[in-house]
């Protein structure tokens, strides 16, 4: 394949330019048009809410509808603000919503507090067998033929040696014999 010879013409002298030589002009024009459309869309979105400068009764009704009704569902401040902003605007809207949600008795009763995790306390480990033991009573179980209803469990913390002894009741006498 060989290169063909051609005659170069400067852009201003080339009156019948093809689309490739004009591509930068086209893309700049498209970008400008897209930016204009974006600005128009933002302006439309900003002006969709009905501006309310009316009575406190109407604002209270709106707050009640968006918070206390089953459809409202007791949302938090941010979620309620975002929902109301889609349809209404008024001066001091955020403050009104914060006060309304803060005064809601149901929200305060059901609000989960900040849970701080308490680190696990690791005690000293035993260094020899039977230095530290654990005991517990398990029951009330099905009564055995010998009349036992409980199990006294024992475990050595160091060796993990375990024992379970059937006992008739939770009194101290059978436990002290062990």
Image (cartoon, rainbow, N blue to C red):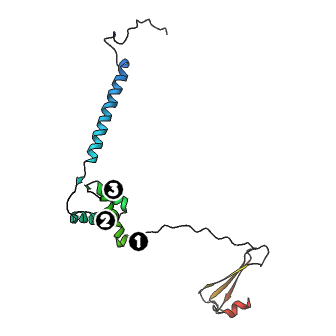
Left or right side of 140 for 22: left
Q: In which quarter of the image is residue 146?
A: bottom right
- Foreground: 168 or 173? 173
Residue appearing at x 36%, y 68% in the figure: 102
- Foreground: 120 or 103? 103
Q: Tell me: residue 170, above or below residue 89.
A: below
The tag earlier along the polypeptide, 1 or 3, is 3
C-alpha separation, residue under disc 1 versus residue under disc 3 = 22 Å
Left or right side of 79 for 48: left
Residue appearing at x 28%, y 46% in the figure: 45
The residue singled out by tag 3 in the image is 82
Image quarter where the C terminus lies is bottom right
The tag earlier along the polypeptide, 2 or 1, is 2
The residue singled out by tag 1 in the image is 110
Q: Quadrant of residue 129?
A: bottom right
Residue 67, label in figure: 2
């Amino acid at each position: 394949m060989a290169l063909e010879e051609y005659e170069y013409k400067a852009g201003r002298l080339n009156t019948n330019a093809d689309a490739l030589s004009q591509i930068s002009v086209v893309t700049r024009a498209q970008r400008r048009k897209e930016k204009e459309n974006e600005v128009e869309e933002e302006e439309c979105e900003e002006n969709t809410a009905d501006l309310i400068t009316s009575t406190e009764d109407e604002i209270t009704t709106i707050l009640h509808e968006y918070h206390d009704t089953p459809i409202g569902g007791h949302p938090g401040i941010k979620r309620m603000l975002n929902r109301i902003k889609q349809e209404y605007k008024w001066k001091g809207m955020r403050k009104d919503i914060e006060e309304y949600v803060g005064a809601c008795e149901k929200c305060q009763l059901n609000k989960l507090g900040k849970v701080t995790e308490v680190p696990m306390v690791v005690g000293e480990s035993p260094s020899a067998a039977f230095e530290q033991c654990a005991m517990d009573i398990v029951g009330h179980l099905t009564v055995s033929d010998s009349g036992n209803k409980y199990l006294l469990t024992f475990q050595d913390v160091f060796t993990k040696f375990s024992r379970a002894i059937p006992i008739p009741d939770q009194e101290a006498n059978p436990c002290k014999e062990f």
